Amino acid sequence: MPPARKRPRTYDPAKIRTAVLAHFGNVRDAVRTLTPDQLAGPTRLGDWTVRELVAHIAMATEALSRAIDQEPPAKVELSLLEWPPATAAFADANIDRTRAFTRENPDLDVLYARTEQRLAERLAATPGERLLATRPGAMNLADYLVTRTVELVVHTDDLNAAVPGLDVPYDRQALAACTRLLVDALAVKAPGGSTEVRVPPYAVVQCVEGPRHTRGTPPNVVETDPLTWVRLATGREEWQEAVRQARVRASGERADLGGLLPLMR
């Protein structure tokens, strides 16, 4: 008999709302300190400048407010765990949209103040079950909020990498939700029970086809920290390099996840 399918992980909507607002506030505080030279500097995202990256963070956050302002769709089209791979279809278009958005919003302080105010107002007045028309597909607000933690955490890491010493802090709940969603996305992509992936203190999943362990230490174990996992899952870091640098500890013949990563870009 096949093992029972696990229920999808649930998230506390109130905590996720608070986390998204808090993390965006952390980014806003940091953006205020950036100099013109820093804003003109390069990032690890192709030829994006820091200014374009900063504008993209606001654009991805403001997408939530814009979706709330639209007429709700008739039905859900996308579950939370279907969201990570669904984003790939829009990666190229996001480059052009980000550049246009950057040109349209030259005053970053005004942009961030507007985004933060609109977000706070709409979240306070909108229930979690409200359906939203998002680019990958219709989702409910509670699920779409979790996807915003991924956008915020991933691009905060990009920003910290681009501006040494900036050190934008990560909201703990936002980092936890981002980590858990991307770990669960791996288990969906490679279902099974032969390998245990541990990202303490936030997530543990079993995945990859093969012999299933029932007790004791599993034969195949992968363990890493949350930010390394986020970088691996989004293509910011290569598997073999992370293993070589001991940022990932992998043991067992089914512990090589290199062929399954990244999960999204």
Image: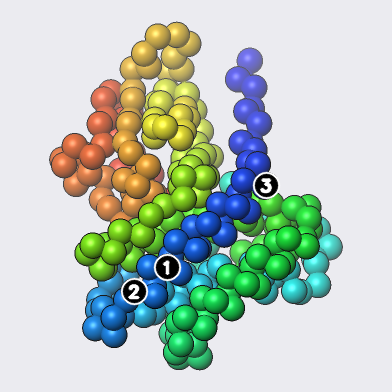
Reading the image, the residue beneath label 2 is 33
Residue 13's disc is 3
- Of pointers 3 and 1, the one earlier in the residue sequence: 3
Q: Residue furthest right?
A: 74
Q: Nearer the viewer, residue 51 or 82?
A: 51
Which residue is located at x 61 percent, y 36 percent?
9
Specify whether 98 is left or right of 247: right
Secondary structure category for the residue under label 2: loop
The percent coordinates of residue 203 (x first, y second) are: 46, 33
- Of pointers 3 and 2, the one earlier in the residue sequence: 3
The percent coordinates of residue 237 (x first, y second) are: 27, 53
From where the camera sits, is residue 225 visible? yes
Nearer the observer: mark 3 or 2; the answer is 2
Q: Is residue 88 above or below residue 239?
A: below
Give the class, few, some or many, for how many residues have Cα within 10 Å of label 3's Cα (few <14, many ≥20): some
Which residue is located at x 65 percent, y 41 percent?
12
Q: As shown in the figure, which amino acid type bears the numbered disc 1? A: Asp
Secondary structure category for the residue under label 1: helix
